[in-house]
Amino acid sequence: FGKQFIYLEKIDSTNTYAKKIADSGAPEGTVVLAEEQRGGRGRLDRSFLSPFAQGLWFSLILRPSFSPMEVSKLTLMAAVAVTKALHRCGLTECGIKWPNDILVHDKKVVGILTELHASAEKINYVVMGIGINVSLTKKMLPRELKRIVTSFAMENVEALRADILKTVLEELEHYYISVSENGFAPIIEEWKVLSCMMNREVEVSAIDRIFKGKAVGLDEDGNLLVETNKGTERVLAGDVHVRPL
Ligand code: BTN
């Protein structure tokens, strides 16, 4: 991954740029990285803060041969790979919040946005957008983000952006090859080990309801299992908050 590398100073969103070049045939493994995003996008139509040179804002183009149904598991794979990479870079206490945020002490250090471009039965390509907060400081954050966002610098972990990027791309490539050879089952197991929410009280905002319970696992499709007083619920989509310890 990253043999084809596009470096941009400023862009609206690297995911949007990657989509354009994927449409005109950019190969699997192409990376688009920007110093600054003016319209960085997150899940659920949220924006993603990406100020100049304060983090790694990039997108990876994948052309997997499996079914579109499996794409949510590709996102779990990315969360596992990036968490492993961050541990190797010294951020040893980070863990995954379902489906694919990476948190340190319950604050977000990485966001992942996977966008699928497919017909009913075949994946055309996937754009995997990853935002890693590196030298972002508290001062740079708007008030509403101060309590929920962190960075390598804010956790007092020194690491160079180039080293983090290299490690993350290495781990992503390693896991991507392993998934194509062995499927997703081993990833689901690793995800549970690297998660920061297992056996913790969570509040789930699903499309049509809000409920509380204890996060107890993932099923084979990557849905979150939450134990409530009415039994075990499967969460397919939505937002999950971990209650403070
Ligand atoms: C989230 O937190 O909900 C996902 C955030 C994903 C941010 C990355 S930064 C690079 C890529 N380009 C975007 O516009 N978003 C992703």
Image: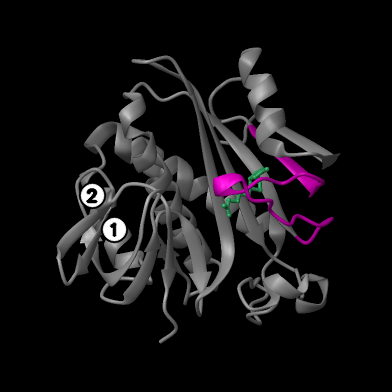
Q: Helix or strand or loop: what does disc 1 sit on?
A: helix
Q: Residue furthest left?
A: 231
Q: Mark 1 points at which residue?
A: 190
Work out whether 208 lies above or below 147.
above
Residue at (50, 80) in percent of width and height = 105
Give the CA distance from mark 1 to mark 2. 6 Å
Where is residue 49? Give x, y as percent: 73, 57
Quadrant where the N terminus sits is top right
Quarter of the figure with residue 13: top right
List the residue tagged with mark 2.
Answer: 186
- How was the colour assigned to the protein in this rendering? one colour
Are the residues tagged 1 and 2 within 8 Å (C-beta)?
yes
Residue 24, compared with residue 102, is above or below; it is above
Above or below: residue 53 compared with residue 21: below
Q: Quadrant of the C terminus?
A: bottom left
Please state the extent of the stretch shown in magenta in the rendering. 31-54
Q: In this view, does 70 lie to the left or right of 28?
A: left
Q: Does the magenta stretch include residue 32?
A: yes
Amino acid type for the residue under numbered disc 2: Pro
